[in-house]
């Protein structure tokens, strides 16, 4: 899975994938291109008018009456008015179309991000995703609006100029237009290099974003270690890398622009020299010569616009490419065809010869796990760090899919039921609580969107959180701050427990978080967790061994699988690994430093 891949996709492929976004707005686009045609025609008429007036004046000055001049002026005025209205449409409605396409793409991107599994996020930096969903897509707006328009105008101008000039004198026209393919070749040559440089710069911005995010989220750790200088140095490297890539990008741009200027000059020289020669040999008139000069100027202006647009084009293409990289990331965990809704379960969980390894890792984390848990049972998972306790629990709600074997809930393979209905039956209290920006109330209500205020308050009471919440400055409406920084660890935990109370699932996964809390908070959280576990099938990842003595089943999980299983009494009597762990734990607790 390469979301920061450096391979550059073909422009044609990107355009083919991007084009469907125009479908909804095809009439806006058609009108936009029609307006573009109008403005082009208005612009191309001026040299004809000049040619007409000079031609008439040179042929027979008497025929150039005030009436003729005023009629021509009036015609030109009408054309300018049409041009103004058409331009307004392109600048307003055309731009809005670009913004709408950007919004549609962002919606699709966010939707896809919601579908991607844990596995994707294990391998992707959030900062990179942020850059793609914001700044990369800004570039797409300008691109979506200008790209069809600019290319259409340039193409039209070249075609119409060719037709008009060809009708005046074809040999001179062919000589002038012979320079265009050279320009095209140069554009193609630099196009690829500029795209690569743009992509590298975008990736580097993503990296910088990720770095800033990491550093700012960890700002408290940075300060506690007084590592501000280290952070500044890391940032300086990334920032300097960005500058280097930009330098390279601008070098290509400069080369491209300069080469275009060279062709520009070549074209003028061709018109002046060849045109003057044809004129002295009587092939074209002075008025024709002037028309040629004016048309070449118009043509070159539009070519210059295309050159200036190249930067925007490359940015847009890069934005689309990076957008597609996420959109093409496979959704590895989703409903299989014909998956059925699970409905309310009793809470029997079974592991049927389950094995598992993480994507990209060769070593099996779980090997041939066989386990039957009855509804309402209270299972505690203990064992050395890295033994696979969290991994095992993550297989129940299908945060990851098993590598081998099956996980069953009430006898049904978790892969045969819809994800939504499966996860609705399982509540997870994580060790690291994540609270969203918003109020305490919003954070509890997150457990069951649409729940009544009474239900939210009841859940808070059940979690033992009501009392401290009412003592907060604005009670339930108190803002929790980013990630809940304004609350204590124990308070955050109890809010997260209230969230699960509100959800009221029959199966629970508790990653015991009490190790991070002081004794009083731990006691309160522990009490809330016990309350929550009542009547539900519960998997507790236990770090404090004294809290699991009442578990109906204790599993000792090691790298080799389930080493021991039984109740506390059974395992203590066995004097095996659990006995060792427990004795070690109680010894440490006596010394005041116990946690696993
Ligand atoms: N997302 C991941 N990608 C790759 N390997 C992982 C991932 N998560 C965990 N692991 C590895 O899988 C093994 C089991 O990890 P797991 O977190 O399940 O252990 P644990 O028993 O819950 O540990 P602890 O008690 O320290 O929380 C470890 O070797 C760990 O390095």
Image (cartoon, grey):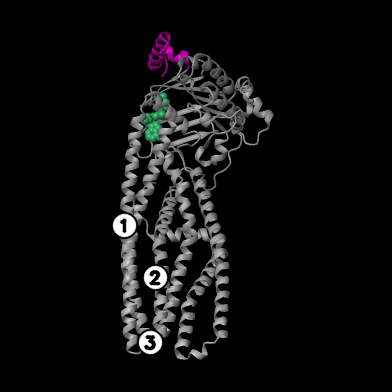
Marker disc for residue 284: 3
N-term mark: 3 or 2? 3
From the top left corner, tell me how far across and down residue 309 is, in percent.
42, 61
Task: Name the secondary structure under disc 2.
Answer: helix
N-term mark: 3 or 1? 1
Report the magenta residues as a range: 567-596
User: Do we see residue 2 in this rendering?
Assistant: no
Nearer mark to the viewer, of 3 and 1: 3
Image marks 1 and 2: residues in contact by CB distance under 8 Å: no
Q: Quadrant of residue 478?
A: top right
Q: In which quarter of the image is the N terminus?
A: top left
Q: Mark 1 points at which residue?
A: 252
Q: Name the residue under label 2.
A: 300
Whether 307 is drawn above or below 527: the answer is below
> At 59% from the left edge and 34% from the top edge, which residue is drawn?
446
From the top left corner, tell me how far across and down residue 63 is, in percent.
52, 90
Q: Quadrant of residue 262?
A: bottom left
């Amino acid at each position: 899975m390469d979301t920061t891949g450096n391979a550059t996709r073909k422009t044609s492929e990107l355009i083919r994938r991007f084009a469907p976004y125009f479908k909804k707005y095809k009439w806006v686009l058609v009108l936009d291109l029609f307006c573009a045609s109008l403005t082009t025609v208005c612009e191309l008429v001026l040299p004809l008018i000049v040619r007409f007036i000079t031609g008439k004046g040179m042929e027979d000055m008497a025929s150039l009456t005030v009436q003729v001049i005023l009629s021509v002026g009036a015609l030109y005025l009408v054309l300018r008015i049409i041009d103004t209205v058409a331009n307004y449409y392109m600048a307003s409605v055309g731009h809005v179309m670009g913004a709408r396409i950007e919004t549609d793409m962002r919606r699709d991107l966010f939707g896809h991000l919601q579908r991607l599994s844990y596995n994707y996020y294990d391998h992707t930096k959030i900062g990179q995703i942020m850059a793609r969903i914001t700044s990369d897509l800004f570039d797409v707006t300008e691109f979506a609006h200008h790209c069809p328009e600019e290319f259409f105008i340039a193409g039209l101008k070249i075609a119409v100029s060719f037709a008009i000039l060809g009708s005046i004198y074809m040999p001179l026209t062919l000589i002038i237009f012979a320079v265009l393919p050279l320009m095209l070749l140069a554009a193609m040559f630099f196009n690829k290099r500029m795209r690569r440089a743009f992509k590298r710069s975008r990736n580097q911005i993503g990296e910088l974003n990720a770095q800033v995010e990491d550093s700012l989220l960890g700002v408290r750790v940075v300060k506690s270690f007084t590592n501000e200088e280290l952070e500044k140095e890391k940032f300086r490297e990334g920032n300097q890398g960005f500058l280097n890539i930009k330098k390279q990008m601008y070098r290509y741009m400069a080369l491209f622009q300069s080469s275009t200027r060279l062709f520009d000059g070549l074209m003028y020289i061709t018109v002046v020299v060849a045109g003057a020669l044809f004129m002295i040999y009587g092939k074209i008139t002075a008025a024709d010569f002037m028309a040629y000069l004016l048309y070449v100027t118009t043509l070159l202006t539009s070519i210059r616009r295309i050159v200036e647009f190249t930067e925007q084009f490359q940015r847009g293409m890069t934005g689309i490419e990076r957008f597609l990289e996420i959109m093409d990331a496979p959704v590895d965990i989703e409903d299989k065809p014909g998956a059925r809704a699970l409905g309310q379960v009793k809470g029997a969980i079974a592991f049927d010869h389950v094995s598992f390894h993480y994507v990209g890792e060769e070593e099996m984390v779980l090997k041939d796990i066989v386990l039957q848990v009855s509804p309402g049972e209270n299972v505690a998972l203990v064992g050395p760090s890295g033994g696979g306790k969290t991994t095992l629990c993550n297989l129940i709600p299908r945060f990851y899919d098993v590598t081998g074997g099956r996980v069953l809930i009430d006898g049904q393979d978790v892969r045969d039921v819809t994800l939504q209905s499966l996860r609705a039956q399982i509540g997870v209290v994580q060790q690291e609580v994540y609270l969203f920006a918003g109020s305490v109330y919003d954070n509890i209500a997150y457990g069951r969107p649409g729940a009544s205020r009474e239900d939210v308050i009841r859940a808070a009471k059940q979690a033992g959180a009501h009392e401290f919440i009412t003592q907060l400055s604005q009670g339930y409406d108190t803002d929790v701050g980013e990630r809940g920084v304004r609350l204590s660890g124990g308070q955050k935990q109890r809010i997260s427990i209230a969230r699960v109370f509100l959800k009221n699932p029959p199966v629970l996964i508790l990653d015991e978080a009490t190790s991070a809390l002081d004794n009083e908070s731990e006691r309160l959280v522990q009490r809330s967790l016990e309350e929550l576990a009542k009547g539900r099938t519960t998997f507790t990842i236990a770090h404090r061994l004294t809290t699991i003595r009442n578990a109906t089943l204790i599993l000792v999980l090691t790298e080799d699988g389930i080493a021991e299983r039984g109740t506390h009494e059974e395992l203590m009597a066995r004097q095996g690994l659990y006995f060792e762990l427990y004795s070690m734990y109680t010894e440490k607790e006596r010394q005041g430093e116990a946690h696993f």
